[in-house]
Every structure is written in structure tokens, then in C-alpha cells.
Amino acid sequence: MNVQPLNDFILVQPVEADDKTASGLYVPDVAREAPVEGTVLAVAAGVDNGVVVGDRVVFKRFAGEELHVNGDTLKLVAVADLLARYVEADAID
């Protein structure tokens, strides 16, 4: 099954936080923070904000709707909830 976002939404594969701290302690599921970063998998037709499939983006902590597709947890995030995207250091003007 494929998911194509509509209106002003993008489909994101969230990057999950580590389950261990830098000192080696395990963090229980209930204490982990919601993901705020992810990789763009699909963009709604007509969205022209510079975000393309494959970009790594940062979004608001509790933004988006969670979907479960083919065993993966994905998020549909509104373009307005995007905060930034990662770019190469030499691409920043």
C-alpha cells in the first residue's frame, strides 16, 4: 500500500530517539520524547516550499498524525508544522 499526502501535508518516516543515554542507562518507553525529526517519503501535489522526497526535516514535537503502513510507523505532518530541513554546510547562504 502506498500513501500519497493531500492538501498541504508531507509523509515523514520519523527518526526514533536512542533507547540509551550517553552514560549507558536505558530509557523506558514512557520517558522517551516524541520524535521531532524524520525523512520525507512523499509530498502532496502542489506543495512548493523547497521540501522534496529524501530531505531530513525537523517538525514540531507533537505535530502530525501517526499512521501504521506495512509495519512502519509514519507521520502525516502539515507543511506549516515544519521548522527546518537539513542542508549541506556549503549550501547555506
Image: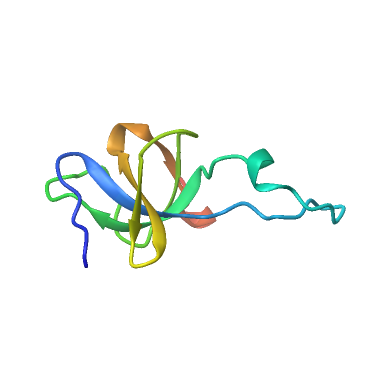
Check the image and report above or below for 70 versus 91. below
Relative side of 62 to 50, left or right: right
- Regarding residue 4, the answer to whether it shows in the image is yes
The residue furthest right is 23
Q: Residue at x 68, y 39 (%)?
A: 31
In percent of width and height, residue 84 lies at 44, 40
- Is residue 84 shown left or right of residue 31? left
Residue 63: image quadrant is top left
Its colouring scheme is rainbow
Near-viewer residue (25 or 91): 25
Q: Vertical placement of 80 versus 26: above or below?
A: above
Q: In the image, what residue occupies the spot 30% across and 60% down?
A: 53
* Residue 50 seen from this side: no
Q: Quadrant of the N terminus?
A: bottom left
Residue lying furthest left: 46
- Residue 63 against residue 55 in the figure, above or below: above
**Residue visible at 28% across and 48% down?**
10
In the picture shown, does residue 35 fall above or below 72? above
**The quarter of the displayed image where residue 16 is located:** bottom right
Q: Which residue lies at the image location 79% right of the left edge and 51% below the top edge?
A: 21
How many numbered marks, from 0 up?
0
| Residue 9, percent from left and from top | 24, 43
Q: Tell me the quarter of the picture where residue 93 sits.
A: top left
Query: Measured from the top left, where is residue 73 in percent x and y?
Result: 41, 56
Frontmost residue, 50 versus 8: 8
Q: Position of residue 2 (x, y in %)?
A: 21, 65
